[in-house]
């Protein structure tokens, strides 16, 4: 990820972000940061960048020319998402940070004085963003806040990859209280449950505390959480069929776009994935698709559906594009909480140096997917005498898949061990592991049953939009 900040105070940006976690990420080349001095693009011999406003009023306004020239020098004709930090913009949030973290490059434009000439904003800005309903002296602090929040969502920036998934705002809940040594401080003792060693009780206590804190401090978030949980209860009526939607919501990835009775649409903006289900019938499918905002449909690249009627309605609504079914199959989920046996022992986390192996042994939807999954610490390899012979992992939408073992090593339990290893890893993270199995892959379907996974009775369709 490349960050470029257009500012009058470049040293403020660099000094503020070259420390702690973002500083380490810069050193390890996980992110790039450049602070561009707008004043250097002024045509005035004294470097002047501001002037009085037309129509009168207090204060000075940054002129269009130096801002535009500074921006133009960075984009060089490329379409680059450009963020202007302003109290008038869309409120920054964790979900928005996750959306921006998918970009390869971001430009932040920092205003000063009374702001920036509207004409250049109209020409270059793609996003108007605010970090709160208050006014600061300039845009540098908001830009640094957003860069920090976005950076920590980039794979590899945090040493503990799970922390970005489990802290404040995960599932619309605030983070639970945490404690460290000593066990007693100022007469206050660490809650007994945290000393019990019972991970189920600890998880239940943490959830209870998160709900309590959110209800007390952020009733707006708690209302969203209650709605989400109500939808999950509806989907649990057919858990195996809807496991992908349930887990997407439980993991804090997607949001409920539409919900009426048993007709539900969940959208994951990171994957640009729409998930749809209806009880039955084309009328219900038609009403569901009609209720989806146009901006969601415009952004959506993939869809997962549980009824053929939804496929027809999507095709009709998106008549200008080609909607094709890429696969039909069944969901498989592991609902037990006990770890599976892993008989093959030499299984390791794949490293960036290994990315060519999965890239050349599987047909990927996007060429950068193998590298992205490896950076996310979500892909594992099986080795024989230090040679990589197979792999398995989970995709950005959460499903375990892309299982591959070289021909000469098959029928030795290596594939089962790889999948079991990934299932156990997700169990450690508190997830319900699941995957999608194409209906024609009878060997894989039988393998899931033998491992103790449950298959959905109904079919699932995967669609891709071109």
Image: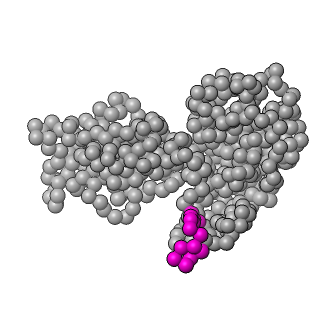
Confirm whether the magenta stretch covers residue 180.
yes
Confirm whether the magenta stretch covers residue 268.
no
In x, y percent, where is residue 138?
28, 54
Q: Nearer the viewer, residue 250 or 342?
A: 342
Q: Is residue 320 visible?
A: no
Q: What's the residue at 64%, 53% (across, down)? A: 251
In x, y percent, where is residue 458?
83, 47
Q: Quadrant of residue 232?
A: bottom right
Q: What's the residue at 39%, 62% (across, down)? A: 132
In x, y percent, where is residue 451?
86, 43
Q: If the image is split into quadrants, where does the C terminus sit?
A: top right
414 horizontally vs 73: left or right: right
Q: Residue furthest top?
A: 408
* Visual colour scheme: one colour
Q: Nearer the viewer, residue 170 or 166?
A: 166
Query: Where 230 falls versus 437 (above or below)?
Result: below
Magenta stretch: dominant secondary structure: loop
Q: Nearer the viewer, residue 441 or 320?
A: 441
In x, y percent, where is residue 129?
39, 53
Q: Is residue 50 visible?
A: yes
Q: What's the residue at 35%, 33% (across, down)? A: 75
132 horizontally vs 379: left or right: left
Q: Which residues are magenta?
A: 175-189
Q: What's the residue at 29%, 32% (across, down)? A: 73
Query: Where 351 falls versus 309 (above or below)?
Result: above
371 horizontally vs 109: left or right: right
């Amino acid at each position: 990820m490349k960050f470029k900040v257009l500012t009058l105070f470049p040293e403020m940006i660099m000094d503020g972000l070259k420390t702690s976690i973002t500083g380490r990420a810069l050193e390890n080349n996980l992110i790039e940061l450049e602070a561009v001095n707008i004043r250097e693009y002024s045509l005035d011999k004294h470097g002047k960048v501001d002037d009085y406003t037309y129509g009168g009023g207090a204060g000075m306004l940054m002129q269009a020319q130096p801002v535009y020239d500074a921006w133009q020098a960075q984009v060089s004709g490329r379409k680059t998402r450009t963020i202007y930090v302003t109290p008038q913009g869309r409120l920054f949030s964790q979900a928005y940070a996750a959306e921006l973290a998918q970009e390869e490059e971001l430009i932040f434009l920092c205003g000063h004085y009374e702001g920036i000439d509207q004409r250049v904003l109209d020409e270059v800005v793609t996003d108007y963003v605010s970090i709160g309903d208050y006014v600061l002296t300039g845009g540098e602090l908001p830009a640094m806040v957003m860069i920090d929040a976005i950076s920590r969502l980039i794979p590899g920036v945090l040493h503990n990859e799970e922390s970005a998934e489990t802290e404040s705002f995960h599932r619309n809940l605030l983070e639970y209280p945490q404690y460290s040594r000593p066990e007693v401080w100022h007469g206050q003792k660490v809650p007994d449950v945290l000393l019990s060693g019972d991970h189920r009780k600890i998880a239940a206590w943490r959830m209870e505390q998160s709900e309590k804190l959110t209800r007390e401090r952020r009733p707006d978030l708690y209302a969203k959480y209650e709605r989400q949980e109500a939808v999950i209860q509806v989907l649990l009526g057919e858990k195996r069929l809807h496991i992908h939607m349930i887990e997407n919501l439980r993991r804090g990835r997607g949001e409920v776009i539409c919900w009426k009775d048993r007709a539900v649409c969940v959208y994951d903006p990171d994957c640009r994935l729409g998930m749809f289900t209806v009880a039955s019938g084309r009328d219900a499918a038609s009403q569901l698709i009609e209720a989806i905002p146009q901006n969601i449909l415009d952004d959506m690249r993939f869809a997962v559906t549980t009824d053929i009627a939804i496929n027809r309605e999507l095709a009709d609504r998106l008549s200008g594009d080609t909607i094709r079914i890429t696969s039909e199959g069944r969901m498989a989920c592991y609902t037990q909480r006990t770890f599976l046996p892993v008989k093959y022992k030499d299984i390791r986390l794949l490293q960036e140096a290994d990315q060519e192996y999965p890239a050349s042994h599987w047909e990927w939807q996007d060429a950068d997917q193998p590298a992205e999954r490896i950076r996310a610490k979500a892909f594992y390899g099986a080795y024989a005498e230090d040679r990589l012979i197979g792999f398995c992992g989970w995709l950005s939408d959460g499903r375990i898949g892309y299982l591959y073992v070289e021909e000469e090593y098959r029928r030795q339990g290596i594939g089962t061990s790889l999948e079991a290893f990934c299932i156990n890893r997700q169990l450690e993270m508190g997830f319900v592991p699941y995957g999608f199995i194409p209906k024609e892959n009878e060997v894989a379907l039988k393998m899931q049953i033998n491992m103790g996974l449950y298959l959905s009775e109904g079919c699932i369709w995967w669609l891709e939009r071109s």
